[in-house]
Amino acid sequence: MSSKSDIWMQASSTVTQRIEKDNVGQVIIIDNIDGANGVTLDPSTGSFTVEQESDYLVVAAPQVGRLNPGDNANFRCWLRVNGENVPDSNVLLNLFNVDVKDVIISQGLVHLNAGDVIQVIMATDNAAAGVGAEAIQPTPDEPLVPAIIVSIEAYG
């Protein structure tokens, strides 16, 4: 069994994901494990499972953008544990035009039991704008800008 100070994960997404429906939370799929101990990832569902009870700091940093011009569009991102939204973890970015790209940070300190499942959720009020988490390859010589980076660490 790992000590709590050794339980952690960093994961990212290599694929751009667009929000499909207005004002409906959509799980951000995370498909790449950068490193981990004591936390597992199911890339098909974007779900992290913790192996040990502890207090965890969860930080989700999506790279946000939009494809289509038109009305303003808000991007929202929050944490969900076992299908329940984590209070006060939602963040919002207003994407007022197509050229805007930014990273926003959703974070929460949550007590989790062994087997609890964490997901990162995104939503928008204007899916027609093509709002989503974007993976960007700046140049062939640079590392990928992941669509999202998620860090999880146990404390206690």
Image (cartoon, rainbow, N blue to C red):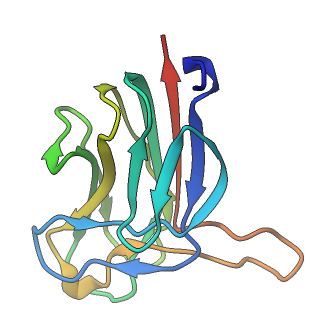
The residue at 23%/70% (across/down) is 73
Q: Position of residue 116 (x, y in %)?
A: 29, 40
Q: Position of residue 143 (x, y in %)?
A: 78, 68
The answer to whether residue 153 is above or below residue 24 is: above
Please indicate whether residue 115 sits to the left or right of residue 154 in the image. Answer: left
Please identify the quarter of the rendering in which residue 144 is found. bottom right
Please indicate whether residue 110 sits to the left or right of residue 146 in the image. Answer: left
Please indicate whether residue 41 sits to the left or right of residue 70 in the image. Answer: right
* Outermost residue toward the top in this view: 156
Q: Position of residue 43 (x, y in %)?
A: 46, 69
The answer to whether residue 111 is above or below residue 42 is: above
Residue 104 visible, this orientation: yes
Look at the image and tell me in which quarter the N terminus lies: top right
The residue at 65%/67% (across/down) is 145
The residue at 54%/68% (across/down) is 13
Please identify the quarter of the rendering in which residue 120 is found. bottom left
Pick whichever, 34 or 140, lies toward us. Answer: 34
